[in-house]
Image (spheres, rainbow, N blue to C red):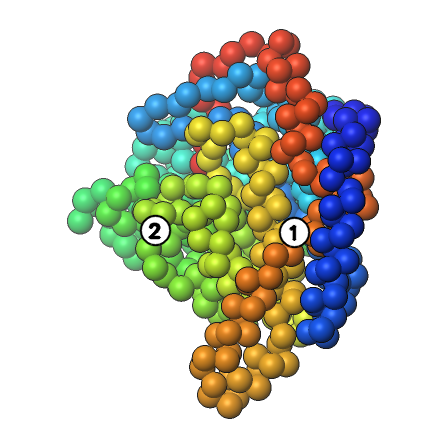
Amino acid sequence: MPMIEKSIIDATNDKALAALKSDYAHLGEVLARRGVDIEWVKTKVAAYGVAVPSWGVGTGGTRFARFPGTGEPRHIFDKMEDCSVINELTRATPTVSLHIPWDKVADISELKQKGDDLGLGFDAMNSNTFQDQPQQRLSYRYGSLSHADGATRRQAVDHNIECIEIGKQLGSKALTVWIGDGSNFPGQAHFARAFERYLEAMKVVYKELPDDWRIFTEHKMYEPAFYSTVVQDWGSNYLIAQELGPKAYCLVDLGHHAPNVNIEMIVSRLIQFKKLGGFHFNDSKYGDDDLDTGSIDPYRLFLVFNELADAELSNAEGFNPAHMLDQSHNVTDPIESLMTSAMEVCRAYAQALIVDRKALDAHQVGNDALLAYETLKQAFRTDVEPILAMARLEKGGAIHPVAAYRASGYRGKVSDKRPAVTGSGGGIV
Ligand SMILES: [Mn+2]
C-alpha cells in the first residue's frame, strides 16, 4: 500500500536515468583505478538503513516558538504514512522509532498492522520522563529516574517498563532512555547520590528486558538542566553500560557534546570496548541545535562513519549499532529534510567504504601524517551520489527523492484531510 504512486516515481526517474547511467559508469572507472568495485559499494549501501523518528515528521520548534506547517500528522498513523513516503522514495529508512507516550495507541495490533501494510518495521522504543503528561500522578520537575523521591523514581521505572511491553508487541528490540534530570544551580543536586539513584532505577528497568533486547542510554551535556546533567557525557554513559550489564549500550547523539569534541574518537573507544549501541544523527553549529544531518559538518559525519566502516570491515566482535535520525525541522518540510538527511548518512557510509584502508594503515604505521590524512580526504572528496542514486533506483526508489516528492503533491493532498495542529507533540530528545 504505497503512499506515492509508482507512475510518479517512474516519470521523474525516466528524465534522470540517462545522466545517472553515464555518471555511474564514470565513477565505476574512477573507483576501479583505486581497486574499489563500485558494485560492492552499491550493494552495501542498498542494504543499509537508518531509522526515522516518529517525532521528526512533525514540524519542530524551539523554546521560543513553533511555526506549524500544513498537513502535519495528527497522530502516529499519519506519522507512519509520512515515514513511508520517506522510505518509498529513498529506500533507506525501513524502520520507525517510536516515542511513548506521544505515539501511544489504544490498540497496539492496529499500529503493528499499519507498519506491516506500509512495509515498515519498528526500531528502538523511546521513553519520556522529561515532561509531565496529563493525569500524571507525580511531577518530573525535579527529575525522574534520579529523583530524590522513591515514588517518583518508581513511576519513571514503570513508564520505561511499559515502553518495553509496547515494543514487544511491535517487534522492537531495544529501549532508548534519555532523561532530562540534572540541576540548574551549583549545590542543587548531590552528583554521586543522584547518579546512584539513577543506576538503581535503571537496574530495575534492565531486569525487565527480554533476552534479545538491548537498552541504549543517551548522554547529553546540558538542557533542560543547564548546570549539570545526571547522564552528562560519554564517560558517565560508559559507566552506566558497565554497571547495568551485557545488554546495555551507549547511544551517541551527535548534538549532545561540547563544541569541538572529537566525537569520532568517542565512537572508536565505544567500539573497542563493545559498548557502542547506536546513534542519533543530526548536525549542530553552536550546541544541540538539532540541525539536519550533514548540513553543517559533513566531514565530521564522514569521520564517524570512517570508524564504523573500519569496525564493520574488520568484523569487530559484537558490533551492531542502531542508526537513527534525531533532528528538528523548523523551516523545512520534515519529509524533505528527513529524506535528505537519510541520504547524507548513506553518503557518509559510502565514502567511508571507499577509503583505501590498506594504504591508510601503511601511512599510520609509517608515520606519514600527510598521506594518512590525504587518504581519508580522497574518499571524502569523491562524489558518491551516483552510487546512492543507483541503489535507490534498483530498490524502486527515486533518483531524485525531493523532486519526486514535490511532483507527487503529497503535502497538499494530506493538508486537505489533516486540519492544522496547534499543540506540541513533537519534541527533541
Ligand atoms: Mn537524541
The percent position of residue 265, horizontal first and vertical second, equals 45, 68
Question: Quadrant of the rendered structure where residue 74 is?
Answer: top right
Q: Secondary structure at mark 2?
A: loop
Q: Nearer the viewer, residue 159 or 118?
A: 118
Which residue, given by chain and number where applicable, does mark 2 sit on? 221
Q: On the picture, is 427 further left or further right than 104?
A: left
Q: Residue at 54% x, 40% y: name it.
A: 126
Q: On the picture, is 290 further left or further right than 365?
A: left
The percent position of residue 95, horizontal first and vertical second, equals 68, 41
The percent position of residue 122, horizontal first and vertical second, equals 68, 39
Q: Cα distance, mark 1 to mark 2?
A: 34 Å
Q: Nearer the viewer, residue 92 or 201?
A: 92
Q: Residue at 62% x, 9% y: name it.
A: 416
Q: Amino acid at mark 1?
A: Glu
Q: Nearer the viewer, residue 314 or 153?
A: 314
Quadrant housing the N terminus: top right
Q: Secondary structure at mark 1?
A: helix
Mark 1 or mark 2, which has the lower sequence index?
2
Q: Residues within 10 Å of mark 1 (few under 14, many from 20)?
A: many
Q: Amino acid at mark 2?
A: Met
Which residue, given by chain and number where applicable, does mark 1 sit on? 385
